[in-house]
Image: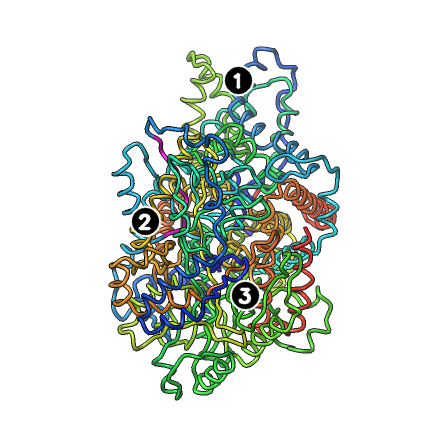
Amino acid sequence: MGGNLPLHLVLSVGGVLMLFPFYWMIVTSFKGLDEASGLPPTLWPASWQWDNYIRAWQAAPFGRYFVNTLIVAGGQTLAVLVTSTLAAYTFARVGFRGKNVVFIIFLGTLMIPLEVLLVPDFIILKYLGWYDTYLALIVPFSASVFAIFLLRQFFLSIPNELWDAAQIDGCGRLGFLWRVAVPLAKPALVTVGLLTFHAGWNSLLWPLIVTGSTDMRVLQVGLTAFQSDARVQYHLWMAAATFTIAPMLVIFLFAQRYFIEGVARAGIRG
Amino acid sequence: MRLLSAVRGELVEPQRTPALSSFDKLRTNGPIALIAALFVVAGCTGPGAPASTSGANQSGANPVDAVEITRPVALEFWHRQVGASEALQQQLIDEFMAANSNIRINPQSLGNYDTLYQKTMAAIQAGSPPDMVAAYETYASDYYEAGALIPFDDYVRSPKYGLLPQEVADYIPSYMEATHFSQYGGKQLTFPYTKSDLVLFTNMDLLRPLGFQKPAATWDEFLTHCRAAVRSGRQCYAAAIDPSAFDGVVFSYGGEVISPDGKKALFDQPPGIKTLQLYETLGKEKLAYQIQGIDDQNDLVAGRALYMMRSSTSVPFLASGFSDNSKWEVSIIPQGGSPKPVTVLYGANISIMKSTPEKQLAAWLFIKWLTRPDVTARWGLDTSNGYFPVRQSALGQATAATFLDSNPRFKQALEVSRSGKVEPSARGWNEVRNYIADAMTGLITGKMTADQAQQMLMQKSAQALAS
Amino acid sequence: MIDAPALEGGVEEVAAVAVATWPSSDEQARPGWRETFIGYAYLLPALVVLAGFHFIPILYALYISLFNWRIRQGPFVGLDNYGSALTSPDFWDALKVSVFYAAGVIPGTLILSVLIGYALHQRIGGRAIYRLVYFIPYITPVVAAALVWRWIFHAQYGILNFVLGLVGIAPQGWLQEPSSLIELLLSQAATLLPGWLIGPSEALVSIMIFTVWHALGFGVVIVLAGLSNIPQELYDAARVDGAGPWRILWRITLPLLSPTLFFLTIVSTIGAFQSFNSIYVMTDPVHGGPLGTTRNVTMYIFQNFFEFTKLGYASAVAFLLFFIILGLTVLQLRVLGRRVHYQ
């Protein structure tokens, strides 16, 4: 494959450009302020300031932000898995009256941009008394039409024979769902879980609006507040960015197959 | 940059100090006595705070007196202090709680004033605002309009929980005056808390080699210094896009930014035009450059900029950044022909939100405690923040003298504050500030000429002030 | 485009379903009541959430948009909020920003995705590594990644200006620069150009560069998936006919990839018009970036809702944005849809 050398060259240069921001983030996060903002920039820290991470971590309640984000993204993920497994199973396996209407309603919600929902959902949360609570962050996102349709495709592909066999064994609907369908759909469930968690981890606009106190800030909101904090400097920005990105990156590296397949699956059907 | 809103203030009529001759006599007595005396003088001759003129006993029973805090109450307090200043505030809160076992205060730092305002407005709409908030006057009037804010008048006048007339008079009158809102019948909607002023910061290590020994006192000098700096390959003015600095320049040219009735912006008057032209020159000759966040502070300390204009709240940062005091200066902003030197008086206050009578009373007791002479002296004269005490008698405390003597740059900032003048609080001014910021950006980046900026400002501020 | 609000599983996944196939009605027999009861019982949790927070609220939003709704509900004003939005120069400026942004980001992402996807589809070593490398930005949180780019773009200390300085290009203001590239190149002469021709500000271009970087991985993976659906025999046949790589790309790959590209275009359009996070983080949200040149429609809605507390007006603008996105999607379905080759 010697003829591929130019291809490798182009792809490598592109790859370096893609990864450079990460390199620059990490390198800057270890520099002192003088070196970070000095010219010409250094490609390698002259002296390693490990305590930048401690200073960044202590400059804002990042521990709290992480816990909040875990609760919110984790809560959303669990809820989405439960609600969409049940709904997807129903769409795939249960014949019920009004199915088409419900299906169209579900599809319709996909077309609604978050912008339109901001104001009414905010007011609804007010009446529920959920403003500035975890419920406000989790509940509105505890069902996902995308997840339902993805899982539905999976459940549809389960052969009828399995269903019949399960019935003979005395499995009820839930028994079949739990013992047969869910194990078979595990890759799809992992994909849905990862994508939901990813979206929850990254969300900014919604938490920005439905929470007020510092105690309820999630990581992304905390990070935007952090960058406008009067004392915070660039090397600390980069340290904070690094430890915000790291968990997602680790999850991704371990589960990249599910991520990439999940995204690809979204596209194939177009 | 959002940070900039940390440095903004309010404008009412300038604080008049008619007793200038007696003031001059004091000049020989040392700066501290001078400042203390000045505020006392101002207190005697300035407009009396309304609260002191009407005793509570004139108008029957004060509803506040009937309230008792018999059970523990917890107060949510939203503010913007960070770092050492937040730690000091926490220390004060802890002391207060130790002395008042029934009152718990849960402070939440929202980090900057824009966030604080947005979150508070959102929380009001959501029906769960905090119990106390740090607030600028324009914010307070918005909260009040939204029906979420409790005026201070009953609390201040309460025979049981209030302040004596002589105590009211001890608050620095210009601070106190700004917290009373004529559009709401003179009600007091906020209470002075975090007060500072606009000053010029100079890197003396850059200035001296250019052949100048003192920071620019006039705008002509400022331009001369800047041209010399740029000629020698340096950057001169690290410009934060802070509308208050713009207002300060207009003041320094002897002008006002708004008509007395609050209906018309005055950027088409000679002082306004001169200000726009100054920014145009700074942009065109690349004497100023626009900064992000707190880059101006970094650049000044690192010797990358000669000048910056900011709130005195920057003093602690620079004091820790410069190894010794000969390397930097704090002075009043350059002047352009104002009859007497003038700068902007900044600063936010603290407001009580509507909750239960007990919580509201608890909030008042905390605020009253927080502005006690000894407490405000600790809060206002501290290396952590660069704020000023809100009580005149605070400056007479022995600790105040010690602090100012050992921290000369803080002392300079405090001295400058006697020339401080507050910015407008007219309805719609908050919006005008956005257009001022646009004009500054346009002029410094060379995207606008002074004429274009003036046209834009006049047109947009007319709309904003009319609504 | 991928930095759009994290509603559901991300806009692109969501839209994927919207564009996806209609359900095949596999149960034709009329269902019994027992089945119907079970069906709704299982659907209930999802139905409650979707109805309560997505479906009913949109009707509520419509209601709100007809009132002068500040902090509390005010008087009914009919379509006034829509009228004042459509006559407000600020709304049109915001729309202009959204359009510039979409017009830069969508073709940028699409072209690069196809080129890189096509290259990665060749039988070369290290494909998995390359794919990983190009995909990593997409999974990093937008807020953190935007922070890093803000640092790269920094006018004084940024590495980008330094590198450009090495090749003799003067330092740029990037995220702080309100002038467009055309204005910067032509200086005074540009003032003669009408508004739309001047193009996006350098600040907006900076954000667009960031977005392409961040979204590229998504496009590449989609293109790769699309390419893997093209039967190998077609390539073999073409090669037998003596077609070169470019001819194959042009005559076989691109036409057969067109459903994928079509999907990408629709998804990118929706994402681009809803972009919020990167703009919120990279430029000053209060002033809409330098001279308001990065305030897109989403930021404009956010500002009116959150800063000015004009709930009725913000809802009306949100609906206008909704109609714009809907209109564009329908337009793309009709115009582009006809040119798509399905196998």
| Magenta span includes B273 | no
Residue bearing mark 1: C41
The answer to which of C34 and B225 lies nearer the viewer is B225
Residue bearing mark 3: B247
- Please state which amino acid type lies under the numbered disc 1: Ala
Residue bearing mark 2: B89
The answer to which of C235 and A108 lies nearer the viewer is A108
Name the front one of labels 1 and 2.
Answer: 2
* Image quarter of residue B99: top left
- Callout 3: chain: B
Image spot of residue A183 (x, y percent): 40, 28
- Callout 1: chain: C
Distance Cα–Cα, label 3 vs label 2:
30 Å
- Magenta segment boundaries in residue numbering: B73-81
- Callout 2: chain: B
- Please state which amino acid type lies under the numbered disc 3: Asp
State the SS at label 2: helix
Near mark 3 (Cα within 10 A), the count class, few <14, some 14-19 or many ≥20, is many
State the SS at label 3: helix
The answer to the question of whether label 3 and label 2 lie on touching residues, with beta carbons closer than 8 A, is no
| Residue reaching furthest to the bottom | B211
Q: Is residue C29 above or below residue B185?
A: above
Residue C200 appears in view = yes
**Majority secondary structure in the magenta region:** strand
Residue A194 appears in view = no
Residue at 59% across, 76% down: B280
Image spot of residue B319 (x, y percent): 31, 67
- Please state which amino acid type lies under the numbered disc 2: Gln
* Image quarter of residue C305: top right
Image spot of residue A166 (x, y percent): 44, 17
Distance Cα–Cα, label 3 vs label 1:
64 Å
* Image quarter of residue C205: bottom right
